[in-house]
Image (spheres, rainbow, N blue to C red):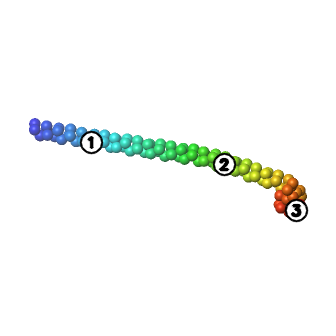
C-alpha cells in the first residue's frame, strides 16, 4: 500500500511540475510578446513624431525662405528706384547721387 501511495504521489508531483513549467513558459512567452509589442508601438510613435517634426521644420524653412526672398526683392526694388532717380540729375546741393555733379 505504501508503494502504491508513493507511486501515486510521485505521479501527481510529476504532473504538477510539468504543468507548472508549461504555465511558466506560457507566462514568459506572453511577457515577451507584450514587450515586443510595446517596443514596436514606441518605434511607431517615434517614427510618427520624427515625421511630424520634419514636416514642421520643412514648413518653417519654406516660410523663412519666402520671407528672405521678399526682403531681397524689396532691397533690389529700392536700389533700382534710387539708381533711376539719381542717373544724370544733380540734386539741389549740386551733387548727384554718385558725387559726379558739381555746382
- Residue 50 placement (x, y as % from top left): 54, 47
Discs 3/2, front: 3
Q: Mark 1 and mark 3 in contact (Cβ < 8 Å)? A: no
At which x and y percent is residue 92?
Answer: 87, 54
Disc 1, SS: helix
Closest to the observer, 63 or 23: 63
**Residue positioned 63% across, 46% down in the render:** 60
User: For numbered disc 3, what is the local secondary structure?
Assistant: loop
Question: Residue 7 at what x, y percent from top left?
Answer: 16, 40
User: Where does label 3 land, which residue?
Assistant: 102
Q: Give the foreground label among 3 and 1.
A: 3
Q: Which mark is residue 38?
A: none
Which mark sits nearer the N-terminus, 3 or 2? 2
Crowdedness near tag 2: few (<14), some (14–19) or many (≥20) residues, C-alpha within 10 Å: few
Q: What residue would you read off at disc 1?
A: 18
Residue 103, x across and y down, in percent: 89, 60
Which quadrant is home to the N terminus? top left
Report the residue marked by disc 2.
64
Amino acid at each position: 500500500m505504501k508503494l502504491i501511495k508513493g507511486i501515486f504521489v510521485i505521479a501527481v508531483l510529476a504532473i504538477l511540475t510539468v504543468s507548472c513549467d508549461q504555465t511558466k513558459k506560457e507566462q514568459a512567452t506572453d511577457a515577451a510578446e507584450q514587450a515586443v509589442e510595446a517596443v514596436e508601438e514606441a518605434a511607431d510613435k517615434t517614427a510618427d513624431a520624427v515625421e511630424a517634426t520634419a514636416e514642421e521644420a520643412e514648413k518653417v524653412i519654406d516660410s523663412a525662405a519666402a520671407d528672405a526672398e521678399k526682403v531681397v526683392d524689396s532691397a533690389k526694388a529700392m536700389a533700382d528706384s534710387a539708381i533711376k532717380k539719381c542717373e544724370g540729375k544733380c540734386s539741389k546741393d549740386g551733387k548727384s547721387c554718385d558725387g559726379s555733379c558739381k555746382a
